[in-house]
Amino acid sequence: MPQDTERSPLREAVGVFDDCHALEEAVDELEEHGFDRAEISLLASEHAVEEKLGHLYERVGELEDDPNAPRTFYVSTESVGGAEGGLIGGLMYVGACAAAGAAVATGGTLAAVIGAAALAGGAGGLIGAALADLVGRHHSDYLQEQLERGGLLLWVDVRDQEHEKRAVEILGRHSAHDVHVHSISKG
């Protein structure tokens, strides 16, 4: 049986948010009402837009209906916090274990093992904290650059008219503007 190589256009709801908190609440409600996180995307970084489209944009509104606009997955504040905590705790743990193992391997006393673990764990924690700060700052800068260009652009893939209606209602309820549904072709 021959395959139909022509794809039907996908439908998606679009909205622009002026506030990170409102965006997070909208995404939470979308997920509560049956939308998968994989169906929700944001505009990628300025650098990614310029690289893919060959130009910068003045306002996010220019890209609302552009199927070629690069997108990225939604990352919640809690996820960023989890990554920061993982960096701090992980490097602290690895440093402490490595130092304790080295002290034991060289025949160190219990006091030396504990001291080495504490020092190396603390140093690992400091490195982790510095890396965690970079992760948090990167995420914050990404959101701020878009807010300065008119808002946070959110797309939601919709499966049918019921999902379209639900997505538009949720986006509007959380103060998104320029809320609409459009068709796009993804190849």
Image: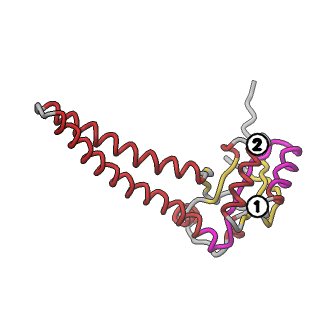
Q: Is residue 164 magenta?
A: yes
Residue at x-position 28% and y-position 51%:
123
Q: Are marks 1 and 2 in contact (CB under 8 Å)?
A: no
Disc 2: CA contacts within 10 A as few (<14), some (14-19) or many (>=20):
few
Task: Report which residue position mark 1 lands on.
Answer: 15
Q: Secondary structure at mark 2?
A: helix
Indicate the quadrant containing the N terminus: top left, top right, bottom left or bottom right.
top right
Q: Position of residue 21 (x, y in %)?
A: 68, 60
Looking at this rendering, what residue extends furthest in the front direction?
A: 111
Q: Earlier in the sequence, mark 1 or mark 2?
A: 1
Residue at x-position 69% and y-position 62%:
153
Instruction: Determine the CA span between mark 1 and mark 2.
Output: 18 Å
Q: Nearer the viewer, residue 23 or 72?
A: 23
182 relative position to 152: left or right = right
Q: Which mark is residue 60?
A: none
Q: Nearer the viewer, residue 130 or 42?
A: 130
163 relative position to 57: left or right = right
Q: Position of residue 178 (x, y in %)?
A: 80, 66
Q: Is residue 80 magenta?
A: no
Type of residue at label 2? Glu
Q: Secondary structure at mark 1?
A: strand
59 relative position to 52: left or right = right
Magenta segment: 146-170
Type of residue at label 1? Gly
113 relative position to 70: left or right = left
Task: Report which residue position mark 2 lands on.
Answer: 32
Residue 36 occupies quadrant = top right
